[in-house]
Image (cartoon, helix red, strand yellow):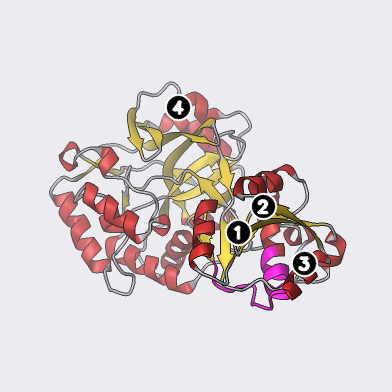
Amino acid sequence: MIFPFRGFRFSEKAGKLEDLIAPPYDVIGKDYRKKLINRSSYNIVHLTLPESFDSEYHDEVKEKLDDWCNKKIFVQDESERYYVVVQKFSIEGKTFERYGFIGLFDLQQSGRIIRHEITFDRYIDDRVKLLKATKSNLEPIFLVFEDRENTLEKVAELTSCQRLDFEDYSIKFSAVAPENLSGLVEKIKKGNLFIADGHHRFQASLEFFKKTKDAPQYIMVYLTNLFSPGLVVLPTHRAIKVKLEQRHLEKVKQFFSVEEKDNLKQAIEFIKSTNNISFGVYFDSHFQTWTLTEEERIMTFMPGHYSRQWKSLDVAVLHHFIIEKVFGIPADEKLYYDRDPYKIVEYVNHNPGSIGFFMQTPDLMKIRQIAMNGEILPPKTTFFYPKVPSGLVIARYV
């Protein structure tokens, strides 16, 4: 199910690895893309993210990738390897290390993958075109396995590695012989894998494999341990263009306890401290918290075909009760999303008639159970931090 491979990696000819890697394409904005491109003419973002998705850029990426391989910018390893990635980072004054490794996943075992996010045909079609043109995985998808013994951490500590700093955290990266991880791989084969990031890329590879003769049978994956203290999941906050009127607030007060707060910090600290569903709310220069007090009553307004666990997610209550029932806006209305709560405040300040919502930290075990039940979660329920860097290694099937 999980296999080593002969990866293509940047050579010394390409420059410093810090200047060549990037976050996954779907979390890079226009300004950040320019910053990455300016770091190096060989930064991986030249391949993973076009200036515009409206263009037919896929063949250009193929030509550039072929050129980089011909010029030995990318060089293939001589033997099959797994690639260990250790990311050391800080959140709210606490330091964590997340251990993971990159290998190939056999798409014939796709039934072992647990998915939890809705996907959109437009993005799947785009990734299929890129895969068809390049016959390569330029970025790994992010999978989670279960190992209470923390086997990978023990192996990684014994491995010599390359060290680099990237953005606001550090990375230790090493290519290891397959036998070093054979025990862990055998253990992983006995369970299912949960997709943390990369639903569109996974679906694109799976559809391409099923529908196309000679399509790659594998997809490059990064795997990390569900039980690792370094597996950090952050909330994604959101804002919507709708003016909060008194009639809306009166309806909210039928189900929620509404409290005024002096600032963003107070609102965030409050929702972190309660065990109830609670939102920080910002509008017209005011901060509030809305804490659910009538959970049983609110359940009658939630979509009936979902489980109680799904209905009790804060993102589900926000989308299907507050946005849909209180404001009368479809639950799938396009919102503004950002992990940084201050960016939500900035958005609301620059868009009069908007309201921002600050979310609680996701409960990963609860989300995993909902996904195992086959239920799809509302958009951006989870944000796994940090993202897995692209450009450490790529997989080519030509």
| Magenta stretch: includes residue 71 | no
The circle on residue 156 is 4
Q: Quadrant of the C terminus?
A: bottom left
Q: Nearer the viewer, residue 17 or 278?
A: 278
**Secondary element type, mark 1:** loop
* Residue at numbered disc 1: 116
Q: Name which residue type carries label 4.
A: Ala
Frontmost of labels 1 and 3 is 3
Locate residue 84, reporting x and y percent.
41, 34
Q: Is residue 339 left or right of residue 214?
A: right
| Magenta segment | 318-335
Q: Name which residue type carries label 3.
A: Val
**Secondary element type, mark 2:** helix
Give the distance between the C-alpha atoms of the residues marked 2 and 1, in whole angstroms: 8 Å
* Residue at numbered disc 2: 367
Q: Residue at x 35, y 23 (%)?
A: 160
Quadrant hosting residue 212: bottom left
* Residue at numbered disc 3: 252
Note whether residue 295 is visible.
Answer: yes
Q: Earlier in the sequence, mark 2 or mark 4?
A: 4
Frontmost of labels 4 and 3 is 3
Give the distance between the C-alpha atoms of the residues marked 1 and 4, in whole angstroms: 29 Å
**Secondary element type, mark 3:** helix
Q: Is residue 175 left or right of residue 46?
A: right
Quadrant hosting residue 79: top left
Q: Name which residue type carries label 2.
A: Ile
Q: Residue furthest top?
A: 158
